[in-house]
Image: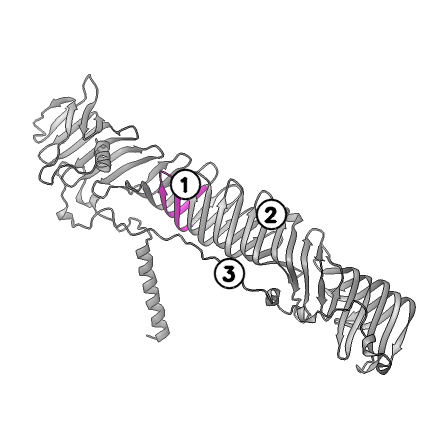
């Protein structure tokens, strides 16, 4: 019986005038009049079947119906079933409808079925004027792919939207969603999450405080403190797109990719994560930060790509790559520039490729390719290798100390370069000074190999191996044009002195405006705010006036209006603090 009234009012509204309300048409059932129910016409199922009632195209069956024509009120009992065409069916054990207030109530295993969803609850209210159904004692919606549960739920018939509040859960074979407020559209399977929410699966956990998820297509869009946790990576961003089918996620604006195993983080303003490929692509001021031996190493390039399992991570940077290592307190920083960079964390090797330059303290090194090797156990710098056309330059007050050769090999102690070997066709220009820093002469020597010793980044000694020719010239005896070795380059103006210098000379990226997900509009309370003594309720109803009122403990949704009011109050508080009132 309830089902009939619910669907009738849901799909057809009111026909007829306020003065003349159309009555239901009882077409079958055994009629009896009982003295104890003087105002009721009682219809009971007989050998032909259940009580059958028709009302403007809606069909209803029940085992017994009490019809109060004077009050335009009906109560239905036992296997109540209604149908509307071929698309909607509703069942309950008990139902009643007040024709004067156009309000329906059903209880006992209430089931509302449509092509895409099935709603189950123990108690359901329906307001025909508002075209809304409501439960507040717990309900379950079975979708084509998921089961949704909540303490409180509201169904908007015209938009086919469910509004779930408090302890909201979606259980899908692939994932589980938990939220405190969720709007679900039954036709499309679209779910909108408001407030702290999670989507948990075997391979990932999504968190957001505002988001959208296609429960049937398994894609989502998340904003406001959003993040995606994989087994060993966490992706943060102002907005995140998520595709479970492709094991893919992308983030836009102020993104971070945190690698908990390797103690590293990648920052930028656009990132793509491919979970199955263990691959991360990041651009727009991309920078990878790794903690090694209590120090941080920054790698920047126009585009960064991180691939490989946690134990074998590889970082590749393409176009205008830069490296910066601040060093510990009291140390000089290490920095570098090149066209592209390669870092293999398992092997402890960093490669600077194409027109590279590296500064270790005051020492500038260039060559065709530069390799930096770290001890994989201690994470400390171990060896430096410069291949082909190797050049080491150190600025002196009167010029430049220079060493060149085919290959340069440098050795580190406690992350500080202390020994440099120049092999094959080595040449040197060196301003030799005594202990008081007084210039002794300019050393211009050719040798098959040269070994240099450094302390606190300064050259303190030179050893020539198989010296060919050369000598120490007084400054007056060595012309200015002879004080520069062939291939010399001074790139000191490119040196990085701080983390901010990673982006020096590069324009700030143009960030797209994030399209947010607004809170839903305030659609008012389900029950009207009417005093108990003014509520129209037939005395035959099982309900009391208290049942038709909003309760203080009923969960309330977050809305655009409540957010605006909260922001207004906070602004007044801030203004009061600033003015000292």
Few, some or many residues within 10 Å of mark 2 (<14, 14–19, 20+): some
The image's mark for residue 510 is 3
328 or 265, which is in the foreground?
265
- Badge 1 element: strand
State whether residue 259 appears in this view: no
Separation of disc 1 and disc 2 at Cα? 29 Å
- Badge 3 element: loop
The image's mark for residue 170 is 1
- Badge 2 element: strand
Residue drawn at the location 87% of the way across and 71% of the way down: 445
Foreground mark, 3 or 2, reads 3
Q: Where is residue 209 in the image (x, y as percent from the top left)?
A: 42, 52
The region drawn magenta spans: 176-196
From the viewer's perspective, tell me whether residue 248 is left or right of residue 375: left
80 or 437, which is in the foreground?
437
What residue would you read off at disc 2?
279
Residue 178 magenta-highlighted: yes
**First in sequence: mark 3 vs mark 1:** 1
Residue drawn at the location 82% of the way across and 74% of the way down: 430
Name the colour scheme: one colour
Few, some or many residues within 10 Å of mark 3 (<14, 14–19, 20+): few
Q: Where is residue 118 in the image (x, y as percent from the top left)?
A: 34, 34
Quarter of the picture containing the N terminus is: top left
To which quarter of the image does residue 538 belong?
A: top left
Separation of disc 3 and disc 1 at Cα? 38 Å
* Cβ atoms under marks 3 and 2 closer than 8 Å: no
Quarter of the picture containing the C terminus is: bottom left
């Amino acid at each position: 019986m309830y089902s009939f009234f619910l669907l009738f009012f849901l799909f057809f509204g009111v026909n007829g005038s306020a003065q003349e309300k159309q009555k239901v048409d009882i077409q079958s059932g055994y009629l009896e009049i009982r003295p104890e129910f003087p105002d009721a016409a009682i219809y009971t199922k007989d050998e032909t079947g259940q009580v059958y009632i028709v009302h403007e195209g809606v069909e209803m069956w029940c085992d017994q119906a009490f019809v109060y024509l004077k009050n335009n009120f009906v109560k239905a009992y036992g296997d109540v079933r209604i149908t509307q065409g071929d698309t909607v069916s509703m069942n309950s054990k008990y139902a009643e409808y007040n024709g004067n207030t156009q309000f329906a109530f059903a209880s006992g295993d209430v089931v509302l079925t449509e092509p895409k969803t099935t709603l189950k609850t123990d108690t359901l209210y329906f307001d025909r004027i508002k075209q809304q159904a409501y439960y507040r004692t717990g309900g379950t919606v079975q979708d084509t792919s998921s089961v949704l549960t909540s303490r409180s739920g509201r169904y908007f018939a015209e938009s086919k939207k469910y509004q779930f509040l408090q302890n909201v859960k979606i259980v899908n074979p692939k994932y589980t969603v938990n939220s405190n407020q969720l709007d679900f559209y039954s036709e499309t399977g679209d779910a909108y999450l408001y407030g702290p929410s999670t989507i948990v699966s075997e391979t990932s956990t999504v968190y957001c405080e505002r988001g959208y998820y296609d429960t049937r297509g398994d894609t989502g869009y998340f904003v406001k403190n959003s993040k995606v946790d994989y087994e060993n990576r966490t992706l943060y961003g102002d907005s995140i797109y998520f595709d479970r089918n492709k094991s893919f996620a992308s983030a836009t604006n102020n993104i971070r990719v945190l690698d908990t195993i390797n103690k590293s983080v990648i920052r930028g303003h656009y990132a793509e994560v491919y979970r199955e490929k263990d691959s991360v692509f990041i651009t727009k001021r991309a920078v990878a930060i790794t903690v090694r031996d209590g120090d941080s190493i920054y790698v920047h390039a126009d585009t960064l790509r991180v691939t490989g399992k946690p134990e074998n991570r590889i970082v590749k940077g393409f176009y205008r790559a830069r490296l910066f290592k601040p060093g510990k307190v009291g140390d000089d920083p290490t920095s570098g520039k090149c066209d592209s960079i390669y870092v293999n964390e398992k092997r402890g090797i960093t490669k600077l490729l194409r027109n590279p330059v590296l500064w270790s303290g005051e020492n500038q090194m260039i060559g065709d390719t530069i390799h930096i090797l770290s001890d994989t156990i201690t994470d400390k710098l171990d060896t430096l290798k410069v291949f082909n056309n190797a050049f080491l330059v150190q600025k002196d007050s009167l010029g430049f100390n220079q060493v060149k050769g085919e290959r340069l090999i440098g050795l580190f102690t406690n992350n500080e370069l202390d020994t440099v070997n120049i092999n094959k066709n080595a040449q040197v220009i060196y301003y030799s000074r005594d202990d008081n820093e007084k210039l002794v002469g300019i050393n211009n020597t050719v040798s098959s190999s040269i070994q240099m010793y450094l302390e606190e980044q300064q050259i303190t000694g030179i050893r020539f191996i198989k010296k060919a020719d050369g000598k120490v010239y007084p400054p007056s005896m060595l012309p200015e044009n002879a004080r520069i070795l062939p291939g010399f380059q001074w790139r000191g103006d490119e040196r990085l002195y701080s983390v901010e210098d990673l982006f020096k000379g590069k324009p700030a990226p143009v960030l797209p405006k994030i399209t947010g997900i607004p809170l839903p509009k305030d659609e008012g309370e389900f029950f009207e705010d009417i005093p108990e003594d003014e509520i129209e309720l037939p005395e035959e109803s099982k309900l009391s006036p208290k049942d038709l009122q909003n309760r203080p403990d009923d969960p309330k949704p977050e809305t655009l209006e409540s957010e605006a009011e909260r922001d207004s109050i906070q602004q007044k508080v801030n203004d009061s603090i600033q003015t000292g009132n």
